[in-house]
Image (tube, rainbow, N blue to C red):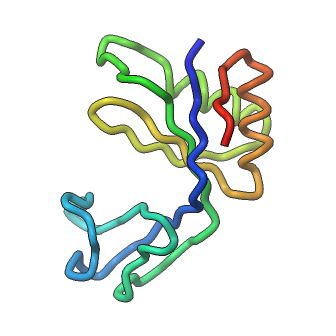
């Protein structure tokens, strides 16, 4: 089973007007929206909308592109327990955000499903 590493900072999901005040090298954008996920302390002043109620865990290790269903399994387990997620994939791994109010319960659900949860 995979190892899950909780991240101790709380995060915000923001919509920003532009990236002029964002202290990141390569933030994400689509053709109709610019969004940002960052620690609450780094929310830029020009954020249009901010939701500061998120906590994050990371799937430890480098996940090979040939691995299939990792996010599907985690999201299904959490959905069965009425826990919504916001997922971000990077080149090496996946990050899963849950509402902070659900975070400890999400970790418990995954632990009961035999995922290894690293201590905070």
The percent coordinates of residue 14 (x first, y second) are: 44, 71
- The image quadrant of residue 25 is bottom left
The percent coordinates of residue 80 (x first, y second) are: 76, 31
Specify the quadrant that holds the N terminus: top right
Left or right, 55 with reference to 64: right
The percent coordinates of residue 65 (x first, y second) are: 29, 18
Q: Is residue 110 above or below residue 25?
A: above
Query: Which residue does the image show at 51% across and 71% down from the upper left?
Result: 40
The percent coordinates of residue 118 (x first, y second) are: 64, 31
Q: Is residue 30 above or below residue 21?
A: above
Specify the quadrant that holds the C terminus: top right
Query: Which residue does the image show at 73% across and 39% down from the upper left?
Result: 106
Extreme-front residue of the structure: 119
Query: Which residue does the image show at 34% across and 87% down from the upper left?
Result: 46
Left or right, 105 with reference to 64: right
Extreme-bottom residue of the structure: 45
Total number of numbered discs in the rendering: 0
Query: Which residue does the image show at 75% across and 50% down from the upper left?
Result: 102
């Amino acid at each position: 089973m995979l190892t899950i590493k909780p991240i101790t900072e709380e995060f915000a999901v923001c919509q920003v007007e532009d990236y002029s005040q964002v202290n990141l090298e390569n933030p994400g954008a689509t053709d109709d929206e610019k969004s940002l996920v960052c620690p609450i302390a780094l929310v830029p002043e020009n954020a249009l909308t901010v939701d500061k109620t998120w906590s994050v865990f990371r799937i430890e290790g480098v996940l090979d592109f040939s691995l299939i269903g990792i996010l599907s399994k985690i999201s299904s387990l959490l959905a069965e327990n009425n826990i919504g997620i916001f997922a971000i994939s990077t080149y090496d791994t996946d990050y899963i955000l849950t509402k902070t109010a659900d975070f400890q319960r999400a970790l418990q659900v995954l632990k009961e499903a035999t995922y290894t949860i690293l201590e905070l």
